[in-house]
Image: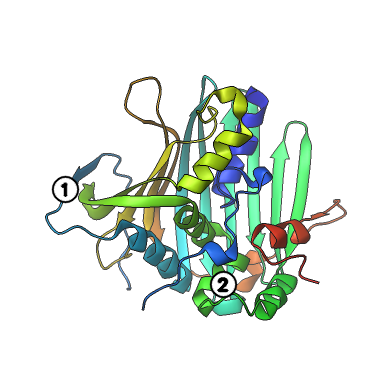
């Protein structure tokens, strides 16, 4: 089972959430409809999160939705990534960088992550150049390169007259990256609690969510050998740490996937931390180009369109 760990981790980071292969990617029609800052940098990497209950409760589900929308609105954004994993008796650490740039359909992104597993170095690169969303996964057994045709996805979105979504709500589908991750979490988890707290010197919201009941039952049915429980690589809950100031409002500084063990409290099995968040960086389209060379490419456009409920897009 250990050899599967990097693949599971990359599925989380790429924003395809927990089980892309099991078609749990949120369908476009499941996304909630939306109701209706510059320019300081946050440096350092505070690790301790202090949370407290509030007298005036905040709608946690709405908070996660707003966080996804806020990310889409950012024209220039860069953050360092630190990832820690505790699965299948392995404790792994990964580092990388996330960048996105541009407006609307011209939005580009680049995600790079390296994960050290014993003597094995595994890496993930995801690049959206505006025309394709490229994903390259490098394992000791070889390299897998895939892409999604963003033009076909946009056409399918335009033809989906039964899906009433605002433009920003649709853009996350073709963008990937952090907006897709938060939108996936919003679609699959019920967030019922938001507490104010501190992440170092940064005021934050700490938001906890559990699987939506229909998805939880679907997952349990897919793993009958687990006797009503989820398998070790699937979390029982998720915790988000979102910015609560006006510098980077609702930015996801931390994403924790939590698992219960026996009667103990839930512990993180995968943690994503985003630090050194900044808008003060020069970017241009050339930084978001992918050169495939002569490598074989797997086209996953049809699969992606089916997963978000848009048929085959043809």
Whether tag 2 and tag 1 are in contact, CB under 8 A, the answer is: no
Q: Residue at horizontal 40%, vertical 69%?
A: 70
Up/down of 127 relative to 7, above or below: below
Q: Residue at x 32, y 27 (%)?
A: 265
Tell me, yes or no, if residue 280 can be seen here. Answer: no
Any mark on residue 53, and which?
Answer: 1
Tell me the quarter of the image containing the N terminus: top right
Q: Nearer the viewer, residue 247 or 221?
A: 221
Locate residue 208, reporting x and y percent. Answer: 33, 46
Q: Report the residue marked by disc 2.
A: 171
Q: Specify how the rendered protein is coloured.
A: rainbow
Q: Is residue 291 left or right of residue 125?
A: right
Quarter of the image for residue 238 reads top left
Give the residue drawn at x 33%, y 61%.
63
Can you give x and y, in whole percent of width and height, for residue 160 in the image?
A: 66, 76
Q: Secondary structure at mark 1?
A: loop
Query: How far across and down, in percent of the image, does residue 88 sit?
Result: 55, 22
Quarter holding the C terminus?
bottom right
For marks 2 and 1, give the CA distance.
Answer: 34 Å
Q: Position of residue 222 (x, y in %)?
A: 63, 35
Residue 20 visible in image = yes
Instruction: Identify the residue at image location x=27%, y=54%.
Output: 205
Looking at the image, is mark 2 or mark 1 earlier in the sequence? 1
């Amino acid at each position: 089972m250990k050899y599967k760990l990097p693949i599971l981790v990359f599925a989380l980071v790429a924003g395809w959430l927990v089980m892309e292969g099991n078609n749990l990617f949120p369908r476009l029609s499941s996304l909630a409809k939306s109701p209706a800052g510059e320019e300081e940098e946050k440096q350092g990497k505070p690790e301790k999160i202090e949370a407290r209950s509030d007298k005036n409760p905040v709608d946690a589900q709405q908070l996660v939705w707003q966080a996804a929308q806020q990310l889409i609105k950012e024209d220039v954004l860069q953050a360092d990534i630190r990832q820690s994993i505790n699965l299948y008796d392995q404790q792994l650490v990964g580092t990388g960088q996330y960048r996105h740039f541009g407006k609307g359909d011209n939005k580009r992104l680049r995600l790079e992550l390296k994960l050290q597993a014993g003597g094995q170095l595994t890496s993930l690169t995801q690049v959206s150049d505006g025309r394709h969303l490229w994903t390259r996964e490098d394992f000791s057994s070889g390299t897998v390169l895939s892409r999604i045709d963003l033009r076909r996805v946009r056409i399918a979105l335009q033809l989906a007259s039964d899906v009433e979504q605002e433009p920003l709500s649709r853009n996350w589908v073709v963008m990937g990256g952090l907006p897709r991750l938060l939108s996936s979490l919003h679609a699959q988890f019920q967030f019922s609690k938001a507490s104010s707290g501190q992440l170092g010197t940064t005021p934050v919201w700490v938001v906890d969510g559990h699987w939506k009941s229909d998805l939880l039952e679907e997952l349990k049915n897919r793993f009958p050998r687990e006797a009503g429980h989820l398998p070790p690589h699937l979390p029982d809950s998720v915790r988000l740490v979102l910015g609560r100031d006006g510098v980077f409002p609702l930015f996801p500084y931390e994403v924790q996937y939590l698992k219960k063990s026996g009667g103990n409290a839930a512990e993180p099995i995968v943690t994503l931390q985003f630090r050194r968040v900044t808008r003060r960086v020069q970017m241009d389209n050339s930084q978001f180009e992918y050169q495939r060379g002569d490598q074989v490419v797997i086209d996953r456009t049809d699969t992606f369109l089916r997963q978000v409920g848009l048929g085959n897009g043809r």
